[in-house]
Amino acid sequence: MHAINAGDTAWVLASGALVLLMTPALALFYGGMVRAKSALNMMMMSFAAIGVTSIIWVLYGYSFAFGKSHGGIIGGFDHLGLGGTLDQVVGPEGHQIPTLAFVMFQMTFAIITVALLSGAIADRAKFSSWILFVAVWVTLVYLPVAHWVFASQNGEGGWIVDHLHALDFAGGLVVEINSGAAALALAIVLGKRDGFKRDPMRPHNMPLVLLGAGMLWFGWFGFNAGSALSAGSLAATAMINTQIAT
């Protein structure tokens, strides 16, 4: 029987909920910045990212991101359908949490990362195309990068973390740089909006933008402090740094 640390588990579960809240917050943030006619489509792209990414994560996403490494490039098939995760734990002795808590926490990272990209294609993509893009991008881009950076397995994990010994504490590479580079590529490929610099494109609801920003700020404490995977001094340090940096 594995000894589970109740305090650490509670914090990771709460942090997963906080990070998940960031995607509806992003929907408000992006939805308020576009014109009224685009608001619903903009917001639904974030909510669709939650559904599509969650399904992928359960079916094969977690397995490819955190399964046994193949050359440091991608995980294996050992956790398809979350197989081999029930009643298992992760973490160092004394700070172990259920594997499913970690699965959920990392799922929310994948969700917010792909949802961030929707801001780069405002007014310029069909909703059906977005759904397909989410599935393809998460599979071909997010999962390998997450494995490279997060899947440390005593020298047999991702090539960036185990061979370059890089530290990505809370997703600076996997989430921020990854989504930023992809968003730039999307914007270049799709080009400017129709009527850009000709038609007025003022944000239709700035209070929504501020509400979304405030909710993102709130969720970011779970994003950063939750990445400690424990309710100790490291989490406290990450939390205070998050506030002061903001």
Image: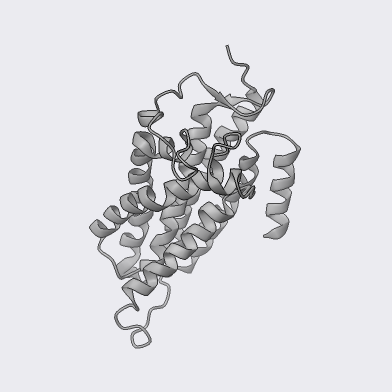
Query: Looking at this view, is 168 or 218 the one in front?
Result: 168
Nearest the viewer among 216 and 137 is 137
Position of residue 92 in the picture relative to residue 58 (left or right): right
State how many labels appear: 0
Q: Nearer the viewer, residue 46 or 145?
A: 145
Residue positioned 50% across, 40% down in the render: 106
Question: Is residue 77 toward the left or the right of residue 233 in the image?
Answer: left
Residue 20: image x %, image y %?
Answer: 48, 44
Classify 137 as above or below 6.
below
Tell me the quadrant of the picture where the C terminus can be found: bottom right
Image position, residue 206 (x, y; %): 48, 68
Picture coordinates of residue 218, whole percent (x, y): 59, 50
**Considering only vertical position in the picture, is 69 above or below 175?**
above
Position of 85 with respect to 130 (left or right) is right
| Picture quadrant of residue 4 | top right
> Which residue sits at x=51%, y=21%?
88
Question: Residue, x 55% and y 36% (percent of image)?
Answer: 156
Give the image's coloring scheme.
one colour
For the point 43% across and 65% down, which residue is it?
183
Q: Kindly give the residue lying farthest to the bottom in the view shown.
A: 198
Q: Evaluate whether residue 211 shows in this view.
A: no
Q: Nearer the viewer, residue 34 or 149?
A: 149
